[in-house]
Image: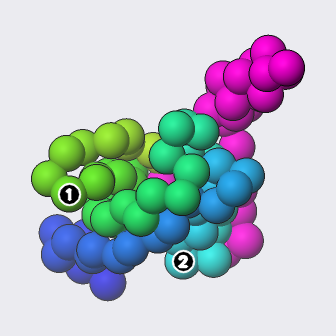
């Protein structure tokens, strides 16, 4: 695969605040749960877009069945859940 050729995929953010991209899992901010994002694969990173807006940039994982989970992505939603009556 040539790295100068852009690959665009779509991914839906799961209830656990993760996306699956080519058999790898990455966490995203909890505010994106339920959103469908366009994922642009670059040589060393993933660009996450909602429409024309750049939402986040994540490191691209090498291999298959890898996971990049950032606990900070989920903390905000956990704090909101605990504060509800």
- The vertical placement of 68 against 70, above or below, is below
- The vertical placement of 17 against 19, above or below, is above
Residue at 20% over, 72% down? 6
Within-10-Å neighbours for mark 1: few <14, some 14–19, many 20+: few
Q: Is residue 28 left or right of residue 53?
A: right
Residue at 64% over, 61% down? 14
The part of the chain drawn in magenta is 60-85
Q: Quadrant of residue 5?
A: bottom left
Residue at 33% over, 41% down? 55
Question: Foreground residue, 7 or 56?
Answer: 56
Q: Of all residues shown, which one is farthest toward the top?
A: 83
Q: What percent of the width, then of the height, locates residue 1?
A: 32, 84
Please indicate, yes or no, whether residue 34 appears anywhere in the rendered image: yes
Dot 2 or dot 1: first in sequence order is 2
Q: Is residue 53 left or right of residue 8?
A: left
Q: Is residue 85 left or right of residue 2?
A: right
Labels 2 and 1 touching (C-beta < 8 A)? no
Residue bearing the label numbered 2: 22
Residue at 45% over, 58% down? 35
Q: Secondary structure at mark 1?
A: loop
Q: Quadrant of the C terminus?
A: top right
Residue 84 painted magenta? yes
Point out the frontmost of discs 2 and 1: 1
Residue bearing the label numbered 1: 51
Q: What percent of the width, then of the height, locates residue 25?
A: 65, 61
Q: What percent of the width, then of the height, locates residue 51?
A: 20, 57
Q: Of all residues shown, which one is farthest toward the bottom?
A: 1
């Amino acid at each position: 695969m040539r790295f100068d050729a852009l690959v665009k995929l779509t991914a839906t953010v799961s209830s656990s605040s993760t996306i699956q991209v080519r058999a790898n899992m990455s966490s995203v901010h909890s505010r994106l749960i339920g959103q469908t994002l366009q994922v642009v694969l670059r040589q060393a990173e993933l660009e996450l877009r909602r429409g024309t807006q750049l939402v986040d940039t994540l490191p691209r994982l090498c291999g298959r069945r890898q996971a990049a989970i950032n606990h900070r992505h989920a903390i905000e939603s956990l704090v909101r859940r605990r504060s509800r009556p």
